[in-house]
Image: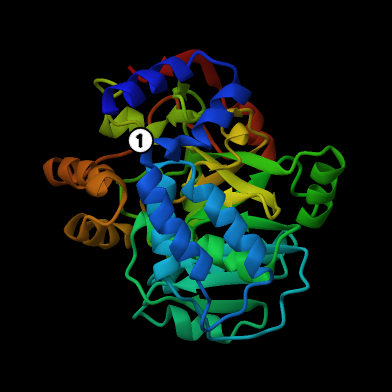
Amino acid sequence: MKSFRYNLKKILKFLPKKVKSFILERWSIFYFEDYKKVKSKVDTYTPLYTKFDSLEDTKRLLRKIAFSGKKGIITCNHFCDEQLKQITDNDLKSSNLIVICVVKNELGRIARWLEYYRKIGVKSFAIFDDNSTDGTREYLIKQHDVEIFVGTHDYTTIDKIVWVNMIVAIYGYNKWYLIVDSDEFFTYQNMENIKIDKYVKTLKSNNELIETSMMLDMYSDGNIFSVSSRENYEKKCCYFDNCGYYIKKTAEAHYIVGGVRKRIFDNTDFKCLPVLSKKSLMFMTKNTFVYTAHTIFPFKYNYLCNFKSVLRHYKFLKEDYNNYVERVTKNNFYNASSEYKAYLELYKRNSSINLKNANSFKWDGSKSINKIEVAEEMITDK
């Protein structure tokens, strides 16, 4: 059976997108006993501390996710084992657009992050606090437009996906959600003149309900980890790579990969490519589920790589070094935190790494999005 699944995945890469999606969304036919077990957990799941907007719709969606394969089964198991508590209530449920973010010890940058999103017109934030100890939670409690959630489990990449989908279930379907990290600034064309509510109205009128954004790593002209989150890091980390991006094609999705992290940390082959495409801005329905950090259910949306927006990504600030040490120690990020191990290993050998080179571009407002080039070349998993 394992050999059959492997060969079928290889064949899927060459089939039409609709056929691929149809088969992958029913992949648990190969794990049917596991599926039956998690289905019974879903059927009896009850949120204890917060009320889901539509519990039956959420359960119906979870059964679909569980039927999508091993990853879906694992995610649903985590979902049924988790409980969320809402610790502030600012009556944001009626909002048509809600920013969702998971934070941990972000006191240095959270004020600037909130200021940025408020400036583009965001009025509601749902933030999951992962046991912050630096005052982040206390700061957020004072914000009139923020509602804070906590959970019962420690962070893993799967639990983060569970928390995001639980928050969606709490606020309800048929509305817009912008799902970003605390080191990401969502940036769209002409945003200097168009607020985000007008932007999403245009998307909806064009029936563009799932926005794919490209993560654009931003850096300074100094050494890596030299700019503090307490400085004006948006102004200091104003450089980006405009080329060196490619499309990676797999049976499950097409991803944008490459960029400065490929250039600096994996300059010899394509063994360890950071994925740079994310589903960020979405009109979530009762049939929509955030599947991974970079993919969504239904799977048909995962073969789209044409981006109109970017997530300016401030990943190498001074405080991030200690965060990455913790991630490596806990091994609680994707692939046992291998990406962060690569950062720290290179930094240990050369602490004066400078990400800027002669081909770096300086950010000049949202029009800079037009300077980014993604190669036609397709990198395909073997």
Residue ranking furthest to the left: 349
Q: How is the image coloured?
A: rainbow
Could you tell me if residue 4 is visible in this image? Answer: yes
Question: Would you name the residue on which mark 1 appears?
Answer: 261
In the image, what residue occupies the spot 33% across and 28% down?
Answer: 263
Reply above or below: 124 against 180: below
In the rendered image of this protein, does residue 324 appear above or below residue 129? Answer: above
Question: Which residue: 35% across, 26% down?
Answer: 5
| Tally of marks | 1
Q: Could you tell me which residue is drawn at 63 percent across and 25 percent down?
A: 18
Q: Nearer the viewer, residue 75 or 142?
A: 75
Task: Name the residue at the right extreme.
Answer: 205
Q: Position of residue 133 (x, y in %)?
A: 34, 80
Q: Quadrant of the N terminus?
A: top left
Residue 193 seen in the figure: no
List x then y, in percent, for residue 34: 36, 50
Pick the residue in front: 126 or 14. Answer: 14
* Left or right position of 41 against 55: left
Q: What x and y, as percent, mark residue 45?
A: 50, 71
Quadrant that contains the C terminus? top left
Is 331 placed above or below 372 here? below
Residue sitting at x 78%, y 73%: 94
Q: Secondary structure at mark 1?
A: helix
**Residue 318, how many percent across, how many down?**
32, 59
| Rendered view: 127 above or below 237 | below
Q: Nearer the viewer, residue 370 or 133?
A: 133
Residue 267: which quarter of the image? Answer: top left
Say what amino acid the circle numbered 1 marks: Arg
Q: Please give left or right for residue 219 compared with residue 351 in the image.
A: right
